[in-house]
Image (cartoon, rainbow, N blue to C red):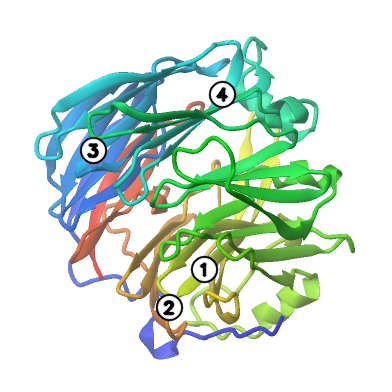
């Protein structure tokens, strides 16, 4: 595939150009002692919603405005599966119980909150299933117009007395892979704004291994099944238990390779055409080379498109060599180990389909885990999957956990927040790309004034407002348990 690497203009950025004359507004230790990296979503131009985990079954759902003021704080019992906007309200879905050895129970509850004051308007159990097997819940709300809840019951018994990390380690080693991917039952329920079930269906059983599922903004389901070396995606029209159509991906993957893919086969429904689905993954092809694949399926016409890029060492070296640094103080580009590359994000933004890749390397010992993540590579295609350009964000870090990267699309610009580690200090790098041309408008590290050098940015939790954005920083408070104080820093576009 011909590479088209667009270069950011050198004049835009000295490396520490973000250091402003005055420190940006900061609320130190805005939230203390959350047990997980917080999640967030946009409610409107001036309010975002954040969730903080206080314990295994205790959360705080907070509304925060563009002045970093807390408008309300609502405690929620249960383990939060999803928080999102639904019919201009705040929807929270939880499992009613959770433990580190058995995971979520199979009873799920939904809360509907008043966005003006956080008051719980409705609280209902929406699914109460058998407790014998591990289940996987899915929540789809589109752009706030639907509430679709799906529960897939696997063949993995919850009674196994091992911790969850041990469970998934065993799965990754292929010991319990078949049970994990097996589907014993599959329920899908659509709810109205009163949290009343409108349709209840059982998805027709499939003999293949379940890989992933998604839904478009109209509530149509797309389910990815693997069978005899082929990935088949079935479309289920909203409210229907049998598939309306089926298309096979243009990829053949050996069974022995499949389990290595884990959850990095990404599906993304088109926002413009309810019949179109995009998919992307990195896999080892028949020639034993790493390949990036991106495909497009049109279920109305049966048309299939597929483009690939071989991720060989020579190709990666050529890509890095062709990159002209934004500023000499920034590190040289380094995409890391080829076999560590994976798709981290796939989405349709306007007239572009963007794939983000990074390489991660995990080093583990009996008492320590280190995650090293290398540069961010962005591939931008048109909607016919023709590569328009590639961009690179030369940031990298090593930490005890994988640090989330944030992506935000607005007015044909793609905003990226990634972590970079320089001389034992973590910096949040702010990058802005024009999706029409591929030009990099801005790329610089945000100031760390009054923020600890070990505090890393939670990129996926950034609060995006109309005129500015707020970056949460994580201050890890305990060595043995993930527990953080979260500070908020306001920044200008």
Between 183 and 275, the one lying in front of the other is 275
Could you say where residue 293 lies in the image, as x and y percent from the top left? 69, 64
The quadrant in which residue 174 appears is top right
Give the secondary structure at mark 3.
strand
**Left or right of 156 in this view: 457:** left
Q: Earlier in the sequence, mark 4 or mark 3?
A: 3
Quadrant showing the C terminus: bottom left
C-beta proximity under 8 Å, tags 3 and 1: no
Which of the two marks, 2 or 4, is nearer to us in this view? 4
Q: Which mark is residue 354?
A: 1
How many neighbours does mark 1 have within 10 angstroms: few (below 14), some (14-19), or many (20 or more)?
many
Task: For marks 3 and 1, give the CA distance.
Answer: 28 Å
Kindly tell me whether residue 422 is visible in this rendering.
no
- Of the image marks 1 and 2, the number of the one nearer the N terminus: 1
Q: Nearer the viewer, residue 191 or 295?
A: 191
Q: How many residues crowd mark 4 within 10 Å: few (<14), some (14–19), many (20+)?
A: many
Name the mark on residue 90.
Answer: 3
Q: Is residue 292 above or below residue 9?
A: above
Mark 2 / mark 4, whichever is N-terminal = 4
Image position of 80 (left or right of 378) = left
Q: CA distance from mark 1 to mark 4?
A: 31 Å
Q: Nearer the viewer, mark 1 or mark 4?
A: 4
379 versus 365 height, above or below: below
Question: Element type at marker 1?
Answer: strand
Q: Which residue is mark 4?
A: 135
Q: Position of residue 478 (x, y in %)?
A: 44, 29
Q: Which residue is mark 2?
A: 435
The residue drawn where x is 46% and y is 65% is 348
Q: Is residue 464 visible?
A: yes
Residue drawn at (10%, 39%), measured in percent from left and top?
A: 116
């Amino acid at each position: 595939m011909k590479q088209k690497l667009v270069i950011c203009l050198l004049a835009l950025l000295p490396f520490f150009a973000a250091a402003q004359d005055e420190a940006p507004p900061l609320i130190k230790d805005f939230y203390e002692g959350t047990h997980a990296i917080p999640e967030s979503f946009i409610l409107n131009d001036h309010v975002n919603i954040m969730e903080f985990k206080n314990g295994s079954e205790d959360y705080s759902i907070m509304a925060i405005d563009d002045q970093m003021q807390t408008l309300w704080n609502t405690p929620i019992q249960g383990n939060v599966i999803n928080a999102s906007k639904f019919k201009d309200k705040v929807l929270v879905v939880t499992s009613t119980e959770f433990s580190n050895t058995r995971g979520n129970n199979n009873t799920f509850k939904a809360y509907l909150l008043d966005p003006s004051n956080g008051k719980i308007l409705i609280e209902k159990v929406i699914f109460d299933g058998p407790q014998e097997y591990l289940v996987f819940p899915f929540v789809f709300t589109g752009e706030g117009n639907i509430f679709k809840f799906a529960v897939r019951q696997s063949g993995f018994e919850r009674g196994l007395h091992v911790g969850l990390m041990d469970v998934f380690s065993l799965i990754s080693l292929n010991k319990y892979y078949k049970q994990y991917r097996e589907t014993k039952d599959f329920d899908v329920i659509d709810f109205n704004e009163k949290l009343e079930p409108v349709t209840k269906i059982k998805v027709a059983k499939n003999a293949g291994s379940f890989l992933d599922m998604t839904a478009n903004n109209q509530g149509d389901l797309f389910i990815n099944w693997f069978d005899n070396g082929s990935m088949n995606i079935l479309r289920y029209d909203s409210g229907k238990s049998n598939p309306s159509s089926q298309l096979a991906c243009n990829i053949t993957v050996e069974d022995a390779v499949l389990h290595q893919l884990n959850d990095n086969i990404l599906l993304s429904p088109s926002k413009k055409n309810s019949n179109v689905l995009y998919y992307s993954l990195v896999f080892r092809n028949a020639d034993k080379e790493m390949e990036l694949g991106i495909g497009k399926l049109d279920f109305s016409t049966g048309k299939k498109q597929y483009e690939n890029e071989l991720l060989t060492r020579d190709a990666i070296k050529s890509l890095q060599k062709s990159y002209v640094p934004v500023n000499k103080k920034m590190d040289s580009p380094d995409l890391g180990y080829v076999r560590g590359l994976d798709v981290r994000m796939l989405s349709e933004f306007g007239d572009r389909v963007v794939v983000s890749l990074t390489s991660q390397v995990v080093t583990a010992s009996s008492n320590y885990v280190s995650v090293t993540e290398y540069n961010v590579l962005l591939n931008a295609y048109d909607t016919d999957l023709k590569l328009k350009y590639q961009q690179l964000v030369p940031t990298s870090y090593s930490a005890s956990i994988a640090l989330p990267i944030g992506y935000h699309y607005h007015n044909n610009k793609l905003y990226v927040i990634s972590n970079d580690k320089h001389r034992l200090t973590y910096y949040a790098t702010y990058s802005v790309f024009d999706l029409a041309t591929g030009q990099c408008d801005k790329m610089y590290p945000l100031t760390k004034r009054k923020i600890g050098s070990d505090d890393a940015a939670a990129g996926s939790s950034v609060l995006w407002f109309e005129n500015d954005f707020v970056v949460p920083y994580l201050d890890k408070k305990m060595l043995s348990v993930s527990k953080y104080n979260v500070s908020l820093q306001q920044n200008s576009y």
